[in-house]
Image: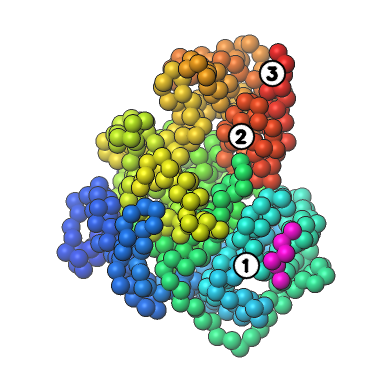
């Protein structure tokens, strides 16, 4: 792997929140750890001791204390903190270290002027909306659905819903009506809150027809609330309330319904690119503990921080971001096109808002690199001390670009996890250096291993990412899965009692990790398993190539099969034999002869989900003859029309 790009400052233990936690462990538990590795090993062996220390160290507000920490250790079915009652919203709205008039939500977008909420204003809005939901008959266990973007109203609605013990679910308004109803017909919300539209860049997008279609497809909905976001002066649709009605002044105090540790907080959905999206139920306590641990100890966030992550309300990074105030951090929300008016927009936003931690996706960082951006030349990023990257593996050149053009003092944290746990399993920590192309560590409390094909743990070689001990933020279950069959099949069917995540990972001697793509999109040539991430790093490193997707079609006879590479080229370029030869030469030199594709074809676009993940598996299905509408749920895609080229290609091959 690469060189060391960042080392922790000499006084890191004095300055960081994890340093404070280590002092607390020494003082209150009599525990002393020589280094991060020793701390991690304790955190994944003494699960009771570690997770109880998180509860105590962060002074979780509970209504009744737990009778134990971990009553049942097996997976699936681990039972955490039995007997405890608490409320996620109460713990977030405590906002430790913040005064009433401190700004805690800073919201920018392309649809309206910036909005700032102080701690006092956020609590007041949650109080009013909570009372409004109660007037609509919402009680514990009811579902409230938001078809709304990353704006303060959506956040207030989440906290108000949680305060009542009701269950929240959001879909970003760029989701098509079919994608939304595929999700919400499963969970049957009683209240629907929706925007009338939004601006994407300078383009207005009217969503009233979609909202009407969603409303018509959800017989469970008793009340619709309209947020006049695109047209604040326009009246709500017939029969709907306005946001002002929901948030009307009231004398009702802000109260929090105490719920059990594993009471459902929100339902997140798998991307739903194939089949119905899985409705993943997360609990109040598990999410709270996991986010306290991750935000404070790994991302080092506290009352002095302004925390930004570019995300929509359809991606779990939104749920992760909005827990920021639970550790005292101010959150920066952005709604709109990150490429408008150019790719420098988000970096200028970071400068304007004094962002100290800038989170985004690997594809965004690589796009900035490709465009030749040097953010520090046009944006004052002096407040910035952390950069987060997720959504796809970040290759060596992505790491180098951050240190060369953003700042050589920032800590770059590449992390990987999933909607399934609403966090990262592997990421960064202030105590460890940053190596180019490498995720620094396995997160505290996450017993991550790499497993070889025969199921044995391996170090220094590619394996399946598994988790061998339970974590509190593993799902409470799937919705409408009373006996847990679907949940078990999703994670525990390959290795009984062990969570199989579906990623390829290599863990080195010092605990650093490299993720090389989804294991279900594996390229297996002659028995050698190849990850897709390194492919893309080489191919998209060429000036001519803007995007790419690679698939491996197995040979039923056990031969090498076919490796097919599809490339999107820069404006005006056509794929010819000279460019094919150049791509093959680069892959052979940088990786190995096994990585050279059998065929290379040009396409106009690579299919991606709304959170920018490439769709290797649906492409592979289409190439093996599965009809487009069965291979992928088009409403979950950013560019569904991109699939047609692969269907045409598959057809022409069949005819040939």
Q: Quadrant of the N terminus?
A: top left
Q: Is residue 423 left or right of residue 313?
A: left
Q: Which one is earlier in the sequence, the residue at label 3 or at label 2? A: 2
Residue 143 % position (x, y): 60, 67
- Residue 324 against residue 514 in the figure, above or below: below
Which residue is drawn at the image coordinates 61% and 61% (left, top)?
A: 187
Q: Which one is earlier in the sequence, the residue at label 3 or at label 1? A: 1
Residue 167 % position (x, y): 56, 67
Which residue is drawn at the image coordinates 70% and 67% (left, top)?
A: 221
Which residue is drawn at the image coordinates 47% and 54% (left, top)?
A: 484
Res. 598 image quadrant: top right
Q: Which residues are magenta?
A: 217-222
Task: Return the residue at label 1.
Answer: 144
Task: Return the residue at label 3.
Answer: 654
Q: Is residue 387 left or right of residue 188?
A: left
Q: CA distance from mark 3 to mark 2?
A: 18 Å
Q: Residue furthest front?
A: 483
| Residue at disc 3, secondary structure | helix
- On whether residue 18 falls in the magenta region, the answer is no
- Residue 100 against residue 271 in the figure, above or below: below
**C-beta proximity under 8 Å, tags 1 and 2:** no
Residue 244 % position (x, y): 71, 75
Residue 532 % position (x, y): 49, 29
Residue count near mark 3 (Cα–Cα under 10 Å), binned few <14, some 14–19, many ≥20: few
Magenta span dominant secondary structure: loop
């Amino acid at each position: 792997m690469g060189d060391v790009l960042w080392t922790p400052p000499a006084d890191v233990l004095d300055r960081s929140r994890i340093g404070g936690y280590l002092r607390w462990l020494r003082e209150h538990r009599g525990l002393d750890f020589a280094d991060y590795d020793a701390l991690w090993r304790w955190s994944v062996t003494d699960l009771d001791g570690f997770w109880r220390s998180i509860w105590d160290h962060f002074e979780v507000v509970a209504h009744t204390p737990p009778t134990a920490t971990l009553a049942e250790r097996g997976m699936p079915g681990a039972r955490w903190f039995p007997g405890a009652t608490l409320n996620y919203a109460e713990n977030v709205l405590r906002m430790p270290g913040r005064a009433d008039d401190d700004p805690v939500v800073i919201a920018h977008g392309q649809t309206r002027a910036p909005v700032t909420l102080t701690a006092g204003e956020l609590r007041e809005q949650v109080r009013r909306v909570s009372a409004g939901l109660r007037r609509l008959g919402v009680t514990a266990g009811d579902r409230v659905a938001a078809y709304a973007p990353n704006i303060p109203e959506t956040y207030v609605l989440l906290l108000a819903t949680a305060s009542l013990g009701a269950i929240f679910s959001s879909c970003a308004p760029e989701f098509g009506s079919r994608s939304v109803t595929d999700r919400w017909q499963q969970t049957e919300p009683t209240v629907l809150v929706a925007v009338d539209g939004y601006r994407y860049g300078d383009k207005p997008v009217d969503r009233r027809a979609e909202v009407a279609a969603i409303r018509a497809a959800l017989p469970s909905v008793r009340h619709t609330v309209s947020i006049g976001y695109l047209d604040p002066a326009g009246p709500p649709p017939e029969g709907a309330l306005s946001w002002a009605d929901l948030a009307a002044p009231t004398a009702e105090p802000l109260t929090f319904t105490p719920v059990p540790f594993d009471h459902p907080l929100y339902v997140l959905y798998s991307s739903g690119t194939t089949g119905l999206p899985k409705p993943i139920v997360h609990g109040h306590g598990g999410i709270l503990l996991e986010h306290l641990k991750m935000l404070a100890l790994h991302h080092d966030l506290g009352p002095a921080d302004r925390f930004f992550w570019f995300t929509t309300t359809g991606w779990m990074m939104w749920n992760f971001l909005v827990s920021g105030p639970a550790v005292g951090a101010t959150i920066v929300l952005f709604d709109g096109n990150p490429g408008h008016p150019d790719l420098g927009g988000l970096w200028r936003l970071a400068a304007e808002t004094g962002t100290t931690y800038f989170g985004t996706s690997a594809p965004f960082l690589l796009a900035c690199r490709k465009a030749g951006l040097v953010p520090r030349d046009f944006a004052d990023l002096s407040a910035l001390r952390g950069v987060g990257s997720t959504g796809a593996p970040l290759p060596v050149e992505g790491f180098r670009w951050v240190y060369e053009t953003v700042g050589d003092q920032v800590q770059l944290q590449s992390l990987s996890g999933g909607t399934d746990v609403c966090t990262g399993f592997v990421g960064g920590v202030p105590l460890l250096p940053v190596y180019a192309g490498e995720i620094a560590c396995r997160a505290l409390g996450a017993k991550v291993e790499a497993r070889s094909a025969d199921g044995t743990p391996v170090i220094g070689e590619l394996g399946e990412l598994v988790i061998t001990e339970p974590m509190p933020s593993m799902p409470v279950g799937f919705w409408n899965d009373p006996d847990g069959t679907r949940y078990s099949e999703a994670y525990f069917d390959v290795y009984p009692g062990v969570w199989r995540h579906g990623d390829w990972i290599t863990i080195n001697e010092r605990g650093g990790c490299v993720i090389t793509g989804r294991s279900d999109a594996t390229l297996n040539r002659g028995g050698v398993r190849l990850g897709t991430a390194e492919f893309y790093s080489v191919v998209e490193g060429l000036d001519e190539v803007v995007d790419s997707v690679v698939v491996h079609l197995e040979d039923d006879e056990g031969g090498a099969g076919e490796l097919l590479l599809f490339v999107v080229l820069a404006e005006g370029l056509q794929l010819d034999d000279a460019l094919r030869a150049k791509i093959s030469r680069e892959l052979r030199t940088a990786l190995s002869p096994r990585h050279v594709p059998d065929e290379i074809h040009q396409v106009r676009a690579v299919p991606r989900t709304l959170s920018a993940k490439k769709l290797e598996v649906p492409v592979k299905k289409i190439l093996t003859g599965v009809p487009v509408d069965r291979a992928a749920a088009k409403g979950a895609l950013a560019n569904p029309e991109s699939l047609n080229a692969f269907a045409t290609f598959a057809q022409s091959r069949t005819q040939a």
